[in-house]
Image (tube, rainbow, N blue to C red):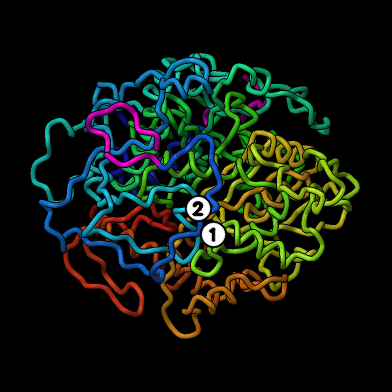
Amino acid sequence: MIIPSRSMDMRHLSKYTVSAAFIVITLLVYLQGSPNLYAHHTRPDSSFHTTAKSHYHEHYHHNDSAETVGKEPSNEFPDLKNFNESRLESRPYKPYPAYNSAEWRKRWQGSHRACVGPRGVEVNENPADMPKAYRIQEPLTLPEPVFGSYHESGLDADHCFDRYSRLESYGFHGKKKRTNASMSVDWSKVDWGSLQHKCLLRNEDRFCHIPSPDATLTRLRAPQSANELGAHQAHNKHQQHPAAAQKDKKCKKRTAVVLRAYQEMTYTKDLSMQLRALISELSLHSGGEYTVFLLIEIRHAPKLLTSPTIYKFALHAFVPREFHNITLLWSVPSFTLPWYPGTNQALNQMLHMDQPLQLFAHLHPQFDHFWMMELDVRYTGHWYDLFANADAWARKQARRLLWERNARFYMPHLHRSYKEFGELVANQTVDGGVWGAPASTTSSLDPEGPTPPYPHPDNDTDYEWGVDEDAGFISFAPILPGPKDPTNPDWGIQKGFATPNSNDSAPRTYYLDATPAVRFSREMLGIMHATTRDYGVDILPEIGPATFAYLHGLKAVSFPLPTFYDPVGEGQPRTLEEIERGFNAQGVRNTPWRWGRGDRWNAVFARLTYAWVISRWEQFGTGIYRWWIHGSEVGTLGEKGRKEGRGRLCLPGVLIHPVKEGDVSGV
C-alpha cells in the first residue's frame, strides 16, 4: 500500500487512482474493526490603496435618495481590450474599515494587527497580496442590474476587476509567459490553517471569545457520552453566548465561512484561487474576523473518521496539501447519525444538508455567525465588501413588513429607492403582515424569538423594532411563502419534510429555493440542532432555515443582491413590466416559484447571474464567468450574442452561481 507523501499533488490523481483510494480506505476500515461511537470603504493609510472611498460602513445608514436609474439595465460590461490601456490603471483594493483610527477605537476594543500571508510578509502592506481594481470613470461605464442595487446595498460600483487584477495575487497568470517574482508562490508549501490561526492569535484582544491554540484544527466528532448527546433535552433559549456576556467591552463577533463539498470534488486551478481569495480577503486582511473551513463528506468509506490512519489517508487523497488544515472530514455513520439517531439517514441526503453545519456550530462556540457556501459559487468583487455589507445592511432592517419585502424581487428601475419599494409593499399588505412568531403553531413548538413590542405592526409607526438586531438568517435571494401543505406536488417539495417523531401537521412554510450562499446566526443553528436531535426532523435546505426562522420569530433578511438577467428563447419575460409581473406574482398559486421544478421557469431562472437552479438551459452567469476568466466565450450569451475572440471583461462585484468544473477547464 502506498500512502501519499505530503509533497504529492492529489488534484492530478486519475479516476482509477481515486477508485483505488476508496478500496484501500475500505480495507483499512475493515482491519480497524467497528468503532465505538462514544470513544474518544473607509480607507486605511496606504500609499498604494485605490483612491476611491470604501463603500463599506460598519454603521449602515439607509440611503433615502433615489436610485440612479438614468439608463436601462443591461449586460454590457466593459471590455478593457477596447480602451487605451495607458488611460487605465489598476490599484490595490482594500475595502476595510479604518482599523486603529480614533473613530474605530471608539467602537471596538483592542488593536488590529497585520497578519503574515502566503508570501511570508504582512499582507496589509504588501501589494502582491491584494487584488487590484480599476476606477470606474470615463471612458469606463458599468451596466445596471435588473434586480437588486449597488446603491442601496452599499456594495461598490465605483470599481471593476478583470481576471488579472482580481486573481493574480492568488495564482492566475493567464497567457503571461513570465510572472513578477514578488507574485510567485509555491502553493504546495502554504498552510492556510496555520496562517489563519496565527492571525487570530495576533488579534485576540479584539474578539469576544477565541478558541484554545489548536481548536480550529481539531476534527469533528460524535458525542463522547450519552449525557453529551442529551436526547430530548429542552433547548435553553436563555443560554448566553460568550460574546454576549462581554458586549459592554465592544468586542468583535467572529464569523465562520463553511464551504460544503464531497470527496469527489476536483480542485481545479480556478477553485484553488477562489479558496485563497476567500481566506486572504476575509481572514488574513481583517485580522481574524472570519475563519474559512472546508467541510467535506466522505461518502465511500463511512467508518473512516474513527481511525487516525484512515483519516490521514483520506485527507491526502482528496484535498490539496495547502488546504489540509482548514479541512474537516465527516461521514453520516460516524458523525451525523450518532448525533441525530432519531432521523432517517437512509432518506435522500438532500434532507440532511444543514445537519453538518448545525453540528459544526455546536462544536465551535467561538463563532457567532456562519456562512455556508457551495464550492460552485464565484464572486468577481472583493469578498469582504460583500459579506460585511450584507451583515450591516441586514442589521439595519426593521422587522415590520420584513417578510413581505423578502418575498419580492427589488427592481430599482421600477420601484425607485428601497424606501419607496417598502412603501409599495406596505400598500399591498392588508393584514399588517408577519409580526413575530405565528400565533398558531404545532403543539410541540415553543417559539424562541423575541416578543413583538406592540400588539400590532401598525403600532410601530417609525419602523423601529429589529433595527440594529443581528439577522438570524441572510439570503442572497428572495424568501417566498409556500403552500400550507408541503406535499403539494405543484411545488416539487412533496418529499421536503420527514418528522418520524411528530404527528403534528406541517405548518405554513416560507419556502427558500436558494442555498448556494446563506448565513446563519448561532441561535438559529442551535434551534435547528435541538429540533433535529429531539424530534428527528429531516427537512430540505431550501425549506428548513426560513421555516425555522418564521416559526420561531427570528429575523430573516433577503439582501438586495445586484443580479443581472439575460432572457433567451420564446416566452421569457423581457420588458421591465413583464419581468415584474412574472417574478413578483404573489400568492402560492401565482408565483413562478410554484413551477420552479418545471422547464419553463427553470429556463428563466437560469438566465440570472445568481441562479439557484441547475437547468438544462444555458446558465447566463456561467457564460459571463467563462468570458471573464478565459477572455472568450464559447456559445451565445443572450439573443444579441457576443463577439468571440480574446477580451478582458471588467466586472464589478457579481455573485455568480453555478460555475462547474467543466466551465473553467484550461484556466
Residue at far bottom of view: 570
Q: Mark 1 vs mark 2: which is more N-terminal?
A: 2
Q: Is residue 422 visible?
A: yes
Q: CA distance from mark 1 to mark 2?
A: 8 Å
Q: Nearer the viewer, mark 1 or mark 2?
A: 1
Q: Residue at x 23, y 55 (%)?
A: 666
Q: Amino acid at mark 1?
A: Ser
Q: Residue at x 25, y 51 (%)?
A: 163
Does residue 35 appear left or right of residue 632 in this picture? right
Q: Residue at x 77, y 55 (%)?
A: 434
Magenta-drawn segment: 30-54
Q: Position of residue 328 (x, y in %)?
A: 49, 32
- Against 491, residue 519 (above or below) is above
Does residue 19 appear left or right of residue 32 in this picture? left
According to the picture, the residue beneath numbered tag 1 turns out to be 417
Q: Position of residue 155 (x, y in %)?
A: 43, 48
Q: Classify residue 70 by image quadrant.
A: bottom left
According to the picture, the residue beneath numbered tag 2 turns out to be 152
Q: Secondary structure at mark 1?
A: loop
Q: Position of residue 291 (x, y in %)?
A: 47, 30
Is 512 contained in the magenta span? Answer: no
| Foreground pick, 665 / 391 | 391
- Against 351, residue 191 (above or below) is above
Q: Amino acid at mark 2?
A: Glu
Q: Classify residue 288 by image quadrant.
A: top left
Mark 1 Cα-neighbour bin, 10 Å: few <14, some 14–19, many ≥20: many
Q: Secondary structure at mark 2?
A: helix
Is label 1 in contact with label 2 (beta carbons under 8 Å)?
Answer: yes
